[in-house]
Image (spheres, coloured by chain):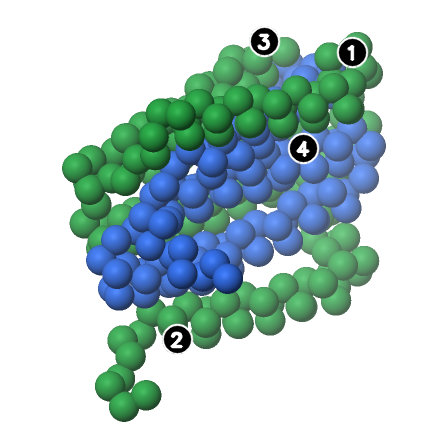
Chain colours: A green, B blue
Amino acid sequence: MSLFYFIAFLSIFFSLMVIFTKNPVHSVLYLVITFFTFTVHYVLLNAQFLAVVNFIVYMGAIMVLFLFVLMLLNLNKESEPMKSVLLKVMGTVAGMCLLVTVAGSIRALEVSNPIILKNPEIGLVGHLGKVLFTEFLLPFEISSILLLTAMVGAVLLAKKESKNI
Amino acid sequence: MMETIVKDLQGVPLNHYILLSSIIFSIGVIGVLIRRNVIIIMMSIELMLNAVNLLLAAFSVYHGDASGQVFVFFVMALAAAEVAVGLAIIVMVYRNTKSIDINSLNKLKW
């Protein structure tokens, strides 16, 4: 049980580091650590399929994409655009207000039932695969079309324009 | 090993998961509000998506229903698509304006 609170503290700490670090490359590296703590959260929930997919897709694919773009654009601390202090304070206060509103509206500070694994094999690959290919077959196929369009769109956008358009 | 870890989980109140997810989501919102680097804004959006994913997984375990985890899977597919297209747009904008400041896009305003 205390493991959860330790990992939760790490998640919050590293996600704060993501948005407050000046250097964009350090930001990406902190984001990788944040995603790793999320993977540990999924393992704690016994959602093993999600843990593996989170590890591969987020820490593997998406973070490599971010790092590649950062290195392609050759950014560093000096070229980093910053907002004024007033806007930063205003943004932080607005975010805190959102947090207080959400926590108040769902009564997150009251006592609630503990999470108990009713069905331990719910997050395993076999069970999730069965659900995915019976109940959610149509959304699954549509998501493949979504990925195809995203791929075509990304290639089309990133290609150099020819002069005669 | 696995069993002892999962046993350790037993007893974390559901509200603490909700609180953790709200905090991470708010951090993402703050990141969008206070930074001007487009790439860091996209990273904040990823943080928000991940907070929602964690909450969906926690609710799915709490209710013993697998639909929540399937939905997390779809959100991950969507996030991959969004990042690919978004970063392609950023590269294109950088090629034209030589800057990744979000203010270089203010001509999109009406």
Q: How far apart are marks 4 and 1 (CA)?
A: 17 Å
Q: Which residue is drawn at 47% across and 38% down?
A: B32
Chain of the residue on which disc 1 is drawn: A
Above or below, B45 against B15 in this view is: below
Q: How far apart are marks 1 and 2 (CA)?
A: 51 Å
Chain of the residue on which disc 3 is drawn: A
* Residue A165 horizontal side relative to residue B61, left or right: left
Instruction: List x then y, in percent, for residue B68.
Output: 74, 42
Q: How far apart are marks 4 and 3 (CA)?
A: 19 Å
Quadrant containing the N terminus of chain A in the rendered view: top right
**Looking at this rendering, what residue extends furthest in the front direction?**
B110
Q: Residue at x 25, y 39 (%)?
A: A80
Q: What residue type is labelled 2?
A: Leu
Tags 4 and 2 on a common chain: no
Chain of the residue on which disc 4 is drawn: B
- Say which residue label 4 marks: B55
Asked if the residues shown at circle 3 and circle 2 are in contact, with their CB atoms under 8 angstroms apart, the answer is no
State which tag comes first along the sequence, 1 or 2: 1
Q: Which amino acid does label 1 sit on?
A: Glu
Quadrant of residue B85 in the image?
A: bottom left
Instruction: List x then y, in percent, for residue A86.
Output: 40, 25
Q: Depth check: A86 or A38 in front?
A: A86
Q: Which amino acid does label 4 sit on?
A: Leu
Above or below, A4 against A56 in this view is: above
Asked if the residues shown at circle 4 and circle 1 are in contact, with their CB atoms under 8 angstroms apart, the answer is no
Q: Is mark 1 on a helix, strand or loop?
A: loop
Q: How far apart are marks 4 and 2 (CA)?
A: 35 Å
